[in-house]
Structure formats: structure tokens, C-alpha cells
Image (cartoon, rainbow, N blue to C red):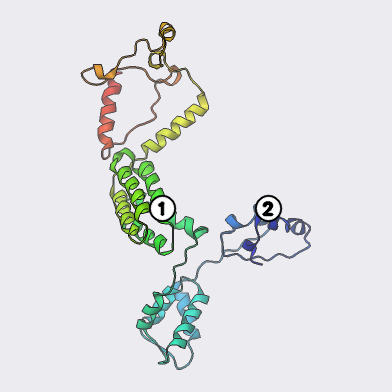
Amino acid sequence: AEIHRLNKGQQDVLLPFLERGWIRFIGATTENPSFEVNNAILSRCLVFRFDALSVSEIEEVIKRSIPNGVEAEEGAIAQLAAMANGDARKALNLLEQLILSDQSKKIALEDLTALSESQSLYYDKHSEEHHDTISAFIKSVRGSDPDAAIYYLARMLEGGEDPLFIARRLVILASEDIGNASPMGLVLATSGFQAVHAIGMPEARIVLAQVTTYLACAEKSNRSYTAINDAIAEVKKSGNLKIPMAIRNAPTKAMKEWGYGKEYHYAHDAASGYVPMQFLPDVIKDRDFYVPTERGVEKSLHEYLGKTKRKK
């Protein structure tokens, strides 16, 4: 049975029969079983993974299947094997299509070029292929490899991926992985998202390519990302710590008499634009959540914070 054809509720029906050993269950799926099959069923079965065939293996299948009297131009079998994407059945279907459409009894590179233009790239937007490709794309940008990033962008676009989905991920990446090391990254990514929304495909590919290559080549920092994660963890751990009285809001006379806002120093009154004060609650007054790197624009932030903290 093609087990992924059954939804999770329907799969549950099989459990009592598997438990009692009343059935011998053999299931097949083209999807990742960890996504599409209930954990309860997986734990009671042996899972065998079948990988795509290599190009050389597909070539052997094609060579054994070419009818007598049909010749292949040099390099044609290798190209045909590459077009099959590891699927022997697809290779045989392509071979049959070539032979039936060409009365010359010769597999020519020219015919393969025409055939390849009619083939759609395998890319299921709801399967493991989708997650693997966007993961490779994001990691390539994060790893400062614009060539790999553009390649995976092309695969997603050719596979029919929603360009707005890609643009959204680039906006997230611009803050998560680039941040203040190159603040223009977020500006460009956000503008790119708006442009993709406004113009659509196929021109949107150019915008996505520009944003992708810029972000891949930009200085990287995840310190804003780690700062908010650390701060949230602290809030969950320590709860609502008392805010220092000096920086509390004091809209009424009574609140001022109680000490709200007392000894607050307005930073702009100082010639340097900075006045040493305690802003964090007493319990965590020495915590450092945001620690800039010494890369890109963030280097100047690192130097500025070094000066202000020395003054404290």
C-alpha cells in the first residue's frame, strides 16, 4: 500500500491489527515517512530507505534497454541519465519517448535538448524536497556562498516555489544572520519582498537574485538573534523583576512624590549624548544580552558600547 495516501486518522485503524500480528504490513511511500506516517506505526515497522540511483547506474539501465538497431550519439546516454534525476522509470519513459518520436533510429543530443525543455523539475512544495532545498538555500547565504545560494534559488523557482515565500525567508535571514553587521541587508530584503509582491514572476526572479547575492556577500552577525533569545530566557527564568525607579513613568504628581522618575538623567543634556545610569533591574544589572561582533558596521557599535560600559 502507498501508506502516505492514508491520513493520520486512517493510519490509526491499522494499529490494533499490527499489535496483534493479524496482518503482514508492507507499505511504500515516496514521501519522508517521519512526516507522513504515524510514529506509532513507524515504531512497529522496519523502515528501508531507497535512495535515488546514481547517474552511472541509470546509464547502465538505459544501455540495457536500448533496442537493437538504435544508436546513441556520444554523450547522449549520459545526458539522458542526468535528466532522469535518479529515477530509472523516468529514464525508460524518456528513452521510449525519444525512440517513438524519431524515425532515424538514433538518439541525438539535439533531440535531448528539445526534450529537456519540456520536462518539469521535481519539486514538491509540501514534501522533504521543499524543506531540504530551502534549508540548503538559507545555509548557503549564511555561509557567504552566493554561487550556491543562486543555484538553490534557481531550483526553487524552476520547481514552482512561491517567490513570496522565498522573499519572506530572506527578510528573516537579514535580521537573524546578518543583523547590525550590515544593516542595509534588512532594508534591501524588505524592499525586495515589496518588489516581488508588486511585480510577480518572472521578473521577480531578478529581485530575488539581487537580494540573495547581496545578503550572501554581506558581513554576518547573529548577535541580535541571540540577544533576544537570551533576554526571553531570562524573562521566563526571573519573571517580572522590579524596574528601577529612575526610569519608571511618572505622569502624576503622586507618582513623582513616590519616587517614580527620580534621578533620571536625560541623555541629550550631556555633551556626549550619554549619561551613566542603571537601566536593568537590580538582580540582573550586570547582564550582557547584546554583544556586538567586530565585523562590518557592528564593529562601531562594539566600540561605542565599550566606551559607555567603561564609564559605568
Find residue 269 and report its image quarter.
top left
* Residue at screen point 52% across, 28% down: 236
Q: Is residue 253 above or below residue 42?
A: above
Spatial CA distance of label 1 from label 2 is 36 Å
Kindly identify the amino acid type of the residue bearing the numbered disc 2: Ala
Q: Position of residue 265 (x, y in %)?
A: 31, 14
Q: Residue furthest front?
A: 198
Residue assigned mark 2: 40
Q: Residue at x 77, y 60 (%)?
A: 21
294 vs 116, left or right, is left
Question: Residue type at mark 1?
Answer: Leu
Q: Quadrant of the N terminus?
A: bottom right
- Residue 78 in the image: state x and y as whole percent: 40, 78
Q: Which residue is mark 1?
A: 164
The residue at 38%/81% (across/down) is 76
Neighbourhood count class around disc 1 (C-alpha, 10 Å): few under 14, some 14–19, many 20 upward: some
Q: Position of residue 147 (x, y in %)?
A: 31, 58
Q: Quadrant of the C terminus?
A: top left
Q: Give the camera-side residue of 39 and 168.
A: 168
Q: Are marks 1 and 2 in contact (CB under 8 Å)?
A: no
User: Is residue 252 shown left or right of residue 218?
Assistant: right
Of residues 247 and 190, the one drawn nearer to the viewer in this rendering: 190
> How many numbered markers are drawn?
2
Disc 1 element: helix
Tell me, yes or no, if residue 4 can be seen here: yes
Q: Does 96 sit above or below residue 46?
A: below
The part of the image, by quadrant, that contains residue 251 is top left
Can residue 182 be seen here? The reply is no
